[in-house]
């Protein structure tokens, strides 16, 4: 009935003090002389000071500690300016013990908005500080930060291990291949045709191993942010011709047709030639590896004044939609790999995309299972300088 | 609505004073030297804002958005590229904020404080010039694409709206951060500013 009476007379049902007491934020009101005009329930329970003891007294006489920026912030608000005090820059407005369970944090961490309050004449008459306890959130963020730092440290350790291991593997493989060469050349005595054929097989498998180790090394350097970019101007068409030459023997042995389409004039781009070559050789190598019949096409698309695209398409088995979603992830291979012999490190596409992104570009994929795949490397004509 | 060159220069100077005032406040809070460049100014109808802004900034952006009212009323936005905003808050809080290059909730609040200081310092210049205070609403943080931000600026109104873009650069330690202040105001507010500038120049 009280409510009905109030409604019928038009009197407000609640006043600002009642609203303040109902809210889960601290509400501190001051007048233009920084005398306390409002101190809600939240502040009473957080500080242990009753509103009756506090209201009407100057803020400085309350014996509560204020943050260094608090006084000037309140004064600015009293002057008519809306003020934000973030926890990370100020910690708190009023020093209040940390809530239960967070005693390891020195004080309650607060996020504060201070609003100017106008008097009846419209002129600034005081300020109202809204204080939110963000201690729990700050503690969670600190935990998350610590966990992420540990994870990053572990990742760095993994990258360092990969780099060291790959480097250590590369040296003995190099020695094995060199000895295989010397044996094949007959330096240590006559070699039969069968022995020469086996030595050639050792060299082929060794070259595969070197390529995998190089992939791991590049992956480790990219992960550690230590892969340098050496920009130079070169002819993109010539680069495509070189990359195709490197896979020609394997394509010929599988009777695959190799088709190149590039402009009949030099097409100069300014980027890291070795990295672009690595990307193209990788994509062409994959195309040859997974295609048993038909052809491999490599094409330069030169229609954008800012970018150049290299498209590598094959008539292989294609990649399922599920595999397309994760094919660029590290250590992932398509489930349609025909045999273990066709498998590599699972880093090739991940490294290719990372290298393309390092050069300011990207690698994308279109594929239809049963009809083939098309990888497009898009690069800016001029690689951006690396950010520090 | 066109401001002549003198009025445009005067408006630029108004932003310049505000930005330097803001830089001084931020330096005081963080204990680090923070400098700002003289802003470059552009005024255009709000419908035409996308092209010039898209030439300046792209991808995901972090904005502090604050409505203001009084003699001059409108919508003010401090706009930074997300990665740069993360780097800025990280530097300003001794490397604590924005781990992994993302703005966590506390880092967003730091950005809200930065935005409040910068927008307040620049727009209070209008109030000083017109001898009328400009009051602000509570700042809001948004992390979204430029297009989404611009859509939120187009408040329905009966009058033609204009955008004043002030492009500047904040410099602290080794970091340079391009920052853009976009102030959307109605034709009446812009006319008031223009008239006040004319009186000042005269």
Image (cartoon, coloured by chain):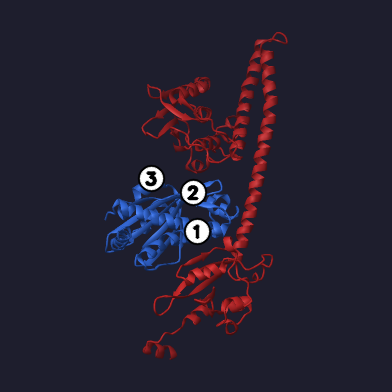
The span from disc 3 to disc 2 (Cα, nearest Å) is 16 Å
Q: Which mark is residue B114?
A: 1
Residue B172: give x, y in percent of width and height. Answer: 54, 50
- Can residue A231 be seen here? yes
Quadrant in which residue A185 is drawn: top right
Q: Position of residue B27 (x, y in %)?
A: 54, 56
In the foreground, A291 or B107: B107
Residue A295 appears in the figure: no
Shade of chain A as shown in the rendered figure: red
At a point 63% along the width and 74% down the height, the residue shown is A64
What secondary structure is marked by label 1? helix
Please determine if labels 3 and 1 lie on a single subunit: yes
Residue A233 position, x and y percent, is 47, 26
Report in which chain the residue with disc 1 lies. Answer: B
> Crowdedness of circle 1 by 10 Å Cα count: few (<14), some, many (20+)?
many
**Whether residue B162 is situated above or below residue A321 in the rendered picture:** below
Which image quadrant: the N terminus of chain A? bottom left
Q: Tell me, what hue is chain B?
A: blue
Dot 3 or dot 2: first in sequence order is 3
Instruction: Give me the disc on residue B101.
Output: none
Horizontal and vertical percent position of residue A246: 52, 22
Residue drawn at (50%, 36%), measured in percent from left and top? A385
- Residue corresponding to mark 3: B55
Same chain shared by disc 3 and disc 2? yes
Q: Where is the C terminus of chain A found, in terms of image quarters?
A: top right
Q: What residue sits right under mark 2 in the picture?
A: B177
């Amino acid at each position: 009935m009280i409510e009905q009476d109030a409604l019928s007379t038009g009197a407000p049902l609640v006043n600002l003090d009642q609203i303040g007491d109902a809210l889960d934020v601290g509400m501190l009101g001051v007048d233009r002389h920084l005398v306390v005009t409002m101190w809600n329930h939240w502040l009473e329970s957080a500080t242990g000071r009753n509103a009756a003891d506090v209201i009407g007294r100057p803020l400085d006489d309350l014996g509560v500690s204020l943050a260094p920026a608090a006084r000037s912030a309140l004064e600015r608000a009293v002057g008519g300016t809306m003020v934000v005090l973030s926890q990370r820059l100020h910690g708190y407005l009023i020093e209040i013990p940390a809530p239960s369970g967070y005693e390891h944090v020195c004080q309650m961490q607060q996020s504060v908005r201070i609003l100017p309050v106008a008097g009846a004449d419209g002129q600034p008459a005081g300020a109202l500080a809204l204080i939110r306890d963000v201690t729990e959130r700050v503690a969670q963020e600190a935990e998350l930060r610590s966990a992420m730092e540990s994870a990053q440290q572990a990742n760095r350790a993994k990258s360092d291990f990969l780099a060291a291991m790959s480097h250590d593997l590369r040296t003995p493989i190099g020695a094995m291949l060199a000895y295989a060469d010397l044996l094949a050349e007959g330096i240590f005595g006559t070699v039969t045709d069968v022995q020469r054929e086996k030595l050639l097989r050792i060299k082929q498998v060794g070259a595969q191993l070197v390529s995998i180790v190089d992939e791991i090394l590049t992956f480790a350097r990219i992960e550690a942010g230590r892969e340098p970019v050496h920009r130079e101007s070169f002819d993109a068409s010539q680069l495509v011709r070189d990359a195709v030459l490197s896979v020609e023997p394997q394509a010929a042995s599988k009777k695959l047709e190799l088709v190149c389409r590039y402009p009949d004039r030099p097409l100069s781009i300014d980027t890291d030639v070795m990295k672009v070559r690595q990307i193209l050789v990788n994509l062409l190598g994959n195309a040859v590896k997974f295609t048993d019949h038909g052809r491999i096409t490599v094409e330069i698309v030169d229609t954008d004044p800012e970018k150049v695209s290299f498209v590598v398409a094959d008539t292989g088995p294609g990649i399922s939609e599920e595999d397309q979603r994760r094919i660029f992830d590290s250590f992932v291979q398509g489930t349609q790999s025909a045999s273990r012999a066709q498998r590599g490190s699972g880093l090739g596409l991940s490294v290719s995309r990372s290298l393309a992104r390092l050069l300011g570009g990207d690698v994308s994929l279109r594929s239809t299972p049963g009809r083939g795949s098309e990888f497009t490397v898009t690069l800016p004509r001029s690689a951006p300088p690396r950010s520090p | 609505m066109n401001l002549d060159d003198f009025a445009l220069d005067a408006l630029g100077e108004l932003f310049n004073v505000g930005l330097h005032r803001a830089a001084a406040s931020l330096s005081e809070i963080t204990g680090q030297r923070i400098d700002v460049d003289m802003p470059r100014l552009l005024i255009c109808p709000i419908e035409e804002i996308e092209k010039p802004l898209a030439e300046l900034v792209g991808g995901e952006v972090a904005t502090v958005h604050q409505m203001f009212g009084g003699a001059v009323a409108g919508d003010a936005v401090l706009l930074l590229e997300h990665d740069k905003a993360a780097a800025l808050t990280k530097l300003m809080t001794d490397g604590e904020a924005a781990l992994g290059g993302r703005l966590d909730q506390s880092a967003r609040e730091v950005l809200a404080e930065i935005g409040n200081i910068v927008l307040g310092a620049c727009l209070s210049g209008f109030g000083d010039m017109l001898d009328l205070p400009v009051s602000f609403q509570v700042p809001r943080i948004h992390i979204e694409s430029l297009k989404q931000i611009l859509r939120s600026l187009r408040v329905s109104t009966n009058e033609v709206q204009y955008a004043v873009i002030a492009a500047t650069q904040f410099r602290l330690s080794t970091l340079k951060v391009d920052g853009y202040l976009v102030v959307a105001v109605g034709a009446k507010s812009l006319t008031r500013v223009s008239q006040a500038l004319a009186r000042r120049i005269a």
